[in-house]
Image: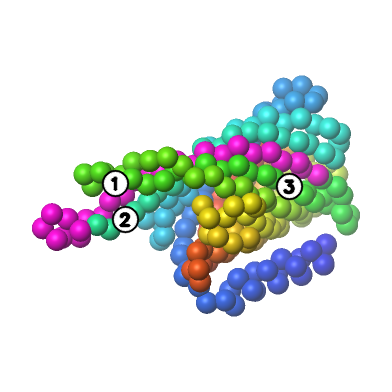
Amino acid sequence: MNRLFSVFVLILALSFSVKSQSIHTSWIAAFNTIKLNDKFSIHFDAQERSGDRFSTMATLLLRPGLNYKLNDQWTVTAGYGYIANRRSFWLTGPADEPINVTGYLPEHRIWQQALFTHPVIGKNTISHRFRLEQRFLMQPSINNYKLSADGNTYANRFRYFFRSVIPFKQEFPFKSGWFAGLQNEIMINLGDKSAVNGKLFDQNRFYVSAGYRLKPAIDLEIGYLNQYVDGRGSAFTNNHVVQLAVYTRL
């Protein structure tokens, strides 16, 4: 666990040490698992992400899926994602005045993942998630100063995520009380990268949180997420995020 914590600190230090465009946002998220039987369950997460300085809704994400439990350690999932992203363009108006055209363009995703969970020091556990995404990114079209979607481009992405929940009181199984959350996720682009940033590396998300387990099925959590996004050319963004989340296992 100490070694994992050192890796997290190093990633966070690197993200702060590089000069970047810094923005401040908030994410509100709900992660839900609904059990159907001993093998199958429904996954559904929903997220609302604000714009810089919490000014507006920048992204709405809805992501359902179907889980299949292979055994006590492995679960596989397939699903669909709908992501509405706010886009903004400055144009020259009829009288040469600047006009800001804004709106939401959808991204559609098909995704598959495998989740592996195992014990670490003491009664703690760590989860590893391996996810593939097939992304259909809508292209903007502006007619009469109104934004709409005009076709799409395709991209593939791989995501590796690991997370540990560390209860403040060491009971097993952990039923209620305070805990700390520690996680990191790296995303890389696969195949043709022309539709995204043209690079292998896409982004990294480091997250540390404090939470309270109300009962075995419900967690409430607040934390800090550092999102480092690599853009085209030399452009990149360092996003400082306050995240509020609820986790349910029904």
- x, y percent for residue 9: 70, 70
Q: Where is the N terminus found, in terms of image quarters?
A: bottom right
Q: Nearer the viewer, residue 43 or 134?
A: 134
Residue 166 location (% of width, % of height): 77, 54
The earlier-in-sequence mark between 3 and 1 is 3
Q: How packed is label 2: few (under 14 Cα within 10 Å), some, or many (20 or more)?
A: few
Report the residue marked by disc 1.
142
Residue 61 in sight here: no
Nearest to the observer: residue 93 or residue 13: 93
Residue carrying label 2:
89
- Residues shaded magenta: 92-116
| CA distance separating discs 3 and 1 | 37 Å
- Whole-Å distance between the Cαs marked 3 and 2? 35 Å
Q: Depth check: 187 or 15 in front?
A: 187
- Residue located at (76% from left, 42% from top): 115
- Identify the residue under disc 3: 130
Q: Which residue is drawn at 47% across and 58% down?
A: 25
Residue located farthest toward the left when viewing the structure as drawn? 95
Residues under labels 2 and 1: Cα distance?
Answer: 9 Å
